[in-house]
Image (tube, grey):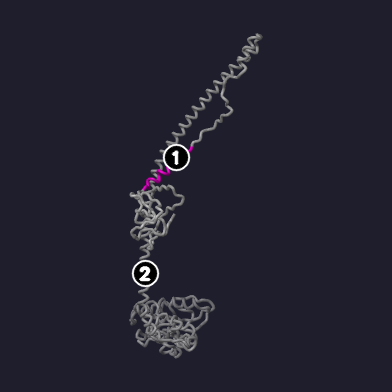
């Protein structure tokens, strides 16, 4: 086999023309009298430089992979042949050259093409290879492209391409180039903390200290350990905060469940009390109504009795008015002159009875809260020296004289206060306080006792 030549037609300008002109006419079949005269060069697509895949022929006679020529024309305004530059007014219909396709199949069967190793995960792939990508051996800083050994050949042969700067394979070449000077970013500006090229050190960063990328890389790598430790610490702090929040949520759920259970008990008991109070209230109202009805019935009977007496008096008056016996008239008139004895009904007001519920409601509220009753006793160790406590710790009064008492860090010395022995942090509690012979007094809850032995953080 002859030495394999490969050129890339995706170049631009004069370099692209030089490469394509050298490829003109390589698809002709003249002189192929035997299989021994065939070379891979005769069956390579001028665009992808690989053996034809689904070859098609244009009106000018040149052959290309169907995919390659289609993509080439998709990016062009005018339709021309990449090899002979013949211009077509409309996009040509691509025809399949049956004979040429059969020759390619025969070539594939008769000639074994030696492939280069495929690219490994840590290696830079060739940007030109289609299908299976091969390992790149060089990167061009002018083309911004990485090439395998096969596709690098034009850069080693074509005069215009030989002037391009080749470096060891690099990925993301465009990101490694200075946007302003189109030069490789090889230095690091310590003032502005950015990567720069050699030209940058002579212009914008002229007075700034710069070091090679490798040197700054080693410095920053040493700092990664500290950064990782700080970030890890931040992660741990947030995990602890998450645990704290979750624990709080669980406590909230437990408190909510307890409150719901207490609420069920309270409302159940309250419903029983309400039913009981409703029965008692209904009974009271009925008794008052019954008493009122009896009272009014007695008044009606009394009125009816008076009406009867008055009716009889009217009959007597009418009967007397018809008598002509002067003596009888005068004797009887004396007894009829004064009206019969009756009550003065003009002073009486008949109003419906009032059914008061206030007393019943007050009793119900008292019974409801009394279910939370607790036993509270006063702590003499916290009492102000002027206060005197009873032996059972249930009573306290102002002694008027400051007593000399043993020093105790719990004793309130700033205010005339005394604390209870019992403490409560949550829930409901009920106890009664009776005040006597005092016009000014305070009853509050204390959240904590200050170190200076004074009660602090009072809530009314």
Circles 1 and 2: CB atoms closer than 8 Å: no
Q: Position of residue 79 (x, y in %)?
A: 51, 79
Quadrant of the snapshot with the C terminus: bottom left
Give the label on residue 360, or none: 1
Q: Quadrant of residue 33?
A: bottom left
The secondary structure that dominates the magenta segment is: helix
Q: Residues within 10 Å of mark 2 (few under 14, many from 20)?
A: few
Q: Position of residue 107 (x, y in %)?
A: 36, 80
Q: Is residue 185 above or below residue 289?
A: below
Q: Is residue 254 above or below residue 340?
A: below
Q: Which residues are magenta?
A: 356-373
Q: Position of residue 319 (x, y in %)?
A: 62, 12
Residue underneath mark 2: 235
Quadrant of the snapshot with the N terminus: bottom left
| Residue at x 50%, y 27% (from the top left corner) | 295
| Residue at x 41%, y 76% (from the top left corner) | 54
Q: Is residue 199 visible?
A: no
Q: Is residue 360 magenta?
A: yes
Residue sitting nearer the eye, 97 or 68: 68
Q: Is residue 71 magenta?
A: no
Q: Is residue 452 visible?
A: yes
Q: Quadrant of residue 240?
A: bottom left
| Residue at x 49%, y 81% (from the top left corner) | 81
Mark closer to the observer (1, 2): 1
SS type, badge 2: helix
Residue sitting nearer the eye, 349 or 234: 349
Q: CA distance from mark 1 to mark 2?
A: 61 Å
Q: Is residue 60 above or below residue 407?
A: below
């Amino acid at each position: 086999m002859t030495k394999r030549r490969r050129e890339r037609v995706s170049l631009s300008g004069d370099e692209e023309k030089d490469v394509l002109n050298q490829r003109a006419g390589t698809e002709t079949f003249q002189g192929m009298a035997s299989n021994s005269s065939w070379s891979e060069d005769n069956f390579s697509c001028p665009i992808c430089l690989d053996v034809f895949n689904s070859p098609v022929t244009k009106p000018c006679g040149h052959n290309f992979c169907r995919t390659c020529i289609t993509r080439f024309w998709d990016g062009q305004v005018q339709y021309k042949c990449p090899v002979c530059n013949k211009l077509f007014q409309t996009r040509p219909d691509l025809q399949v050259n049956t004979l040429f396709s059969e020759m390619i199949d025969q070539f594939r069967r008769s000639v074994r093409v030696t492939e280069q190793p495929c690219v490994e995960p840590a290696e830079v792939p060739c940007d030109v290879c289609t299908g299976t990508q091969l390992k790149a051996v060089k990167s061009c800083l002018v083309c911004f492209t990485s090439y395998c050994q096969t596709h690098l050949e034009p850069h080693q042969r074509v005069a215009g391409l030989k002037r391009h700067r080749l470096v060891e394979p690099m990925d993301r070449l465009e990101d490694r180039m200075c946007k302003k000077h189109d030069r490789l970013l090889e230095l690091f500006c310590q003032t502005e903390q950015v990567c720069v090229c050699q030209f940058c050190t002579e212009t914008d960063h002229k007075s700034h200290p710069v070091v090679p990328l490798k040197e700054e890389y080693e410095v920053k790598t040493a700092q990664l350990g500290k950064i990782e430790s700080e970030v890890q610490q931040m992660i741990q702090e947030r995990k602890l905060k998450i645990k704290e929040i979750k624990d709080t949520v669980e406590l909230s759920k437990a408190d909510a469940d307890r409150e719901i259970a207490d609420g069920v008990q309270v409302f159940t008991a309250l419903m029983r009390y309400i039913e009981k109070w409703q029965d008692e209230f209904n009974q009271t109202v009925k008794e008052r109504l019954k008493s009122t009805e009896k009272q009014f019935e007695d008044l009606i009977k009394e009125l009816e009795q008076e009406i009867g007496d008055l009716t009889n008096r009217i009959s007597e008056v009418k009967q007397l008015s018809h008598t002509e016996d002067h003596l009888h008239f005068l004797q009887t008139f004396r007894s009829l002159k004064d009206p019969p004895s009756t009550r003065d009904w003009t002073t009486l007001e008949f109003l419906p009875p009032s059914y008061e519920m206030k007393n019943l409601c007050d009793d119900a509220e008292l019974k409801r809260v009394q279910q939370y009753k607790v036993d509270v006793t006063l702590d003499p160790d916290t009492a102000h020296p002027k206060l005197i406590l009873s032996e059972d710790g249930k009573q306290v009064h102002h002694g008027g004289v400051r007593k000399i008492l043993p020093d105790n860090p719990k004793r309130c010395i700033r205010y005339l206060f005394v604390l209870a022995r019992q403490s409560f942090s949550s829930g409901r509690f009920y106890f009664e306080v009776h005040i006597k012979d005092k016009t000014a007094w305070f009853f509050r809850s204390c959240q904590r006792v200050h170190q200076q032995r004074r009660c602090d953080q009072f809530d009314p």
